[in-house]
Image (spheres, rainbow, N blue to C red):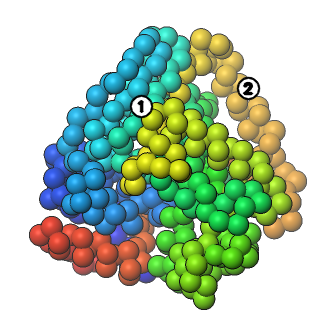
Amino acid sequence: MPSVPAGALEDHVAAIFEAAGSPPDEARTVAAHLVGANLRGHDSHGVIRVPGYVALAKDGVLRPGAPTTIARESGATALIDGGMNLGPVVAIRATEIAIAKAREAGVAFVSCFNTGHIGRVGAYGEQAVAAGLGAMGGVNSPGVRLTAAFGGGHRRTGTNPLMIALPSGDPAKPFVLDMATSVIAEGKLKVAVNRNTPVPPGDIIDGDGRPTTDARDFYGTGDNPKPGALLPVGGPVGGYKGFGLNLAIELLSGALSGSGTAVEGARGTNGVWLIAFDLGRFTEPEAWREMYEALAAHVTEPPYAPGHDEVLLAGEPERCRMAERLASGIPLDDETLRQLEETAAGLGVPAMAAG
Ligand code: NAD
């Protein structure tokens, strides 16, 4: 698989979004967000999304450059209208608003509607942590049905990620839990189809509710022509817990913001909720740091289970992958690259220089 330096890929993607109508600074914001997801190993939420975002802009569903406005506001809350701009632009602005309010009030809860797909939700947690705060949040995808209810045989809700981000003693190493409440994110199935690789047992069912490892069965393009479903986190046995989380996030994201739920809503969008809070209203930074480090040491110490030689904390796998990919480039499979260049060519943007 060819690898592309992150900077060259970001420049290329920024040129594509600019050609699709985004102002240069917003085109750069979206490109940096997507390439940032690739850098952290989340190829499912990286540049593989460019063709989809551009198609929605061409269809007039997304409106590049639209302003983000506050529809309703109180001291610690804001309901934010993203104007149907690209999601990362809106979500970064929404997080800025949450940060400003949490610094004043100690805590802030923001909710967004009319917002394109915001990509990797952990990025906004990292933004809050970099501002010295903690954060939690999540998104739903109105009108989208991908995940089965626990015990259900068909797609019912989105993959509805949950994010919790907390500072550690080291500003470069925050705790960033950022997880789909389906066993895997749907984008990882797209990656598996593009790469022609199987998915682990217990992740998906086919169109007849039967377990399968062929990602094409999810899309109805494998042996079974009926589209299958992702299982909620916890899988075939403990999936009732994931189902509960998934539904809570569907409500907090889609019903609270008015964006809509899996029942009905504008495709290509995310309903968003984000809470930012000031840890300093509860504890001293030094006391937090000491407790964090003691707990981290406690849970990561050996012995390890067979087949494991370490225990990682949430956020660490992404940091390891980023160090590798900053050094050696971002691997892009042929199909993702082909679709990216097809999108670029359609907008008159020259292809990335080879090598
Ligand atoms: P994942 O399963 O790769 O990781 C989930 C979490 O587990 C992360 O916080 C990670 O740091 C942690 N983790 C991973 N391996 C670990 C290990 N060995 N030990 C300890 N912790 C570990 O992520 P995912 O659930 O596939 O989600 C991928 C991305 O998709 C996320 O960034 C999410 O925000 C994004 N997403 C976005 C949308 C949307 O509509 N915008 C929808 C779904 C998912």
Identify the image quadrant of residue 285: top right
Q: Disc 1, ligand 1: is the CB inside 8 Å?
A: no
Q: Residues within 10 Å of mark 1 (few under 14, many from 20)?
A: many
Residue drawn at (72%, 61%) of the image: 152
Disc 2 marks a residue whose amino acid type is: Met
Residue behind mark 2 = 291
**Residue 69 against residue 28 in the figure, above or below:** above
Percent of width and height locating residue 346: 17, 72
45 sits left or right of 89 in the view: right
Residue behind mark 1 = 95
Name the residue at the front extreme. Answer: 263
Percent of width and height locating residue 267: 40, 55
Percent of width and height locating residue 96: 38, 28
**Residue 165 against residue 308 in the figure, above or below:** above
Disc 1 marks a residue whose amino acid type is: Thr
Q: Quick one: label 1 or label 2, which is nearer the N terminus?
A: 1
